[in-house]
Amino acid sequence: MNKLSFSLLTFLLFLAGCANFDTSNLQSAKPLPAGERRLSWQVAPALSYAHLIPLQNDTGETIAEGDEHISIGIANRPRITIGLGRGMELSGAFSFYMGTEYNIAQIGSHLKHDTPAAMLKLQAKKSFPIGERYHLAIAPTYTANNGVFTPRRSACKFAAKGWEIPVIYTKVIPNAEGNHRHSFTMRYAEAVIKSEVKYIPAIYDGSDMSIYKQPDHTMYRAALIYTFGYEKAKKRRFFDVGLELVIVGERGQIMPIFGINWDIAGMKEIPWK
């Protein structure tokens, strides 16, 4: 790992959050050759959408609002990519962390990070060569995550499932040591958020905590991402930077995208047959 990758990884590992969604791309349109497998590690911010979701009681009255600021968690995960040939790839990435405690006992109690939370991405990519150095790819992706966030006097448990459609355009520039890749991605995504909330009234006597199942919310996301990549000695690195518009109901927010990816094992190093 080079010094830049290590410094960025160290910075990202200090971030923490709960109701977060991984928004990174960290790939190019150039596919792996048939039969080649790569194990890589990805580190990227997972940006909160909790502040976009109003929490309601059984009569539809808003009882709590999400945080007004954007909180940033961390997606720190392995990714496996398999080249299928004919410009096709399959990949999967999974991250697991301990989120905020859901079983809060009282106002002002210390919130322990002891609720399991996870993020999953499964992707199939098809790439089309355009000339010698250019590639265009489409990569339908299934996404899922769950966790807990804690707006004022409440705790909300959620699960979100959805899909992404990134369209990636890449220019490959060969050099003596490998190649550089400049990729531009347009991505549209949707996810359905299912949740329930535990609400503590302003005057809490220990007996009147309420649990309300929330209506489903659909989250819409649209992103523009630039990814710089390079390959050296058959090991790849990718660096993301971009912006994403996120809309839930009548609320919207523009969020930043950045992250890093590096291969930690190639085909011969993975103990598979």
Image (spheres, rainbow, N blue to C red):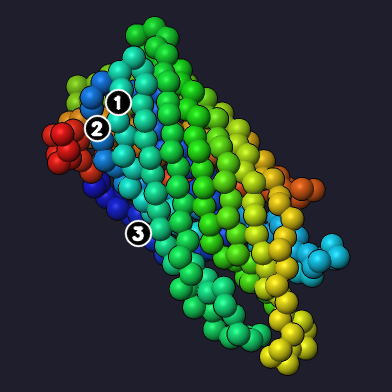
Q: Position of residue 150 (x, y in %)?
A: 62, 70
Task: Using the image as rendered, state which of residue 124 and residue 232 is in the foreground.
Answer: 124
In the image, is 196 to the left or to the right of 31? right
Q: Which residue is mark 3?
A: 10
Label 1 to label 3: alpha-carbon separation? 31 Å
Identify the residue position indicated by label 1 in the image. 83
Badge 2 or badge 3: first in the primary sequence: 3
The secondary element bearing badge 1 is classed as strand
What amino acid is found at the position of numbered circle 3 in the picture? Thr
- Residue placed farthest to the top in the image? 131
Position in image of residue 211 (x %, y %): 70, 72
Q: CA distance from mark 2 to mark 3?
A: 27 Å
Q: Are marks 2 and 1 in contact (CB under 8 Å)?
A: yes
Q: Which image quadrant is residue 218 in?
A: top right
| Helix, strand or loop at mark 3 | helix
Q: Which mark is residue 37?
A: 2
**Residue occupying the point 80% across, 48% down:** 250
Q: Residues within 10 Å of mark 2 (few under 14, many from 20)?
A: many
Residue 7: % across, % down: 33, 54
Q: Earlier in the sequence, mark 1 or mark 3?
A: 3
Question: Which badge, 2 or 1, comes first in the chain's sequence?
Answer: 2
> Is there a contact, CB below 8 Å, between mark 1 and mark 3?
no
Along the horizontal axis of the image, is 22 left or right of 129?
A: right
Which SS class for mark 2?
strand
Q: CA distance from mark 2 to mark 1?
A: 6 Å
Instruction: Identify residue type, mark 1.
Output: Gly
- Residue at left 71%, top 57%? 53
The amino acid type of the residue labelled 2 equals Arg
The correct choice, above or below, for 238 with respect to 76 in the image is above
Q: How packed is label 1: few (under 14 Cα within 10 Å), some, or many (20 or more)?
A: some
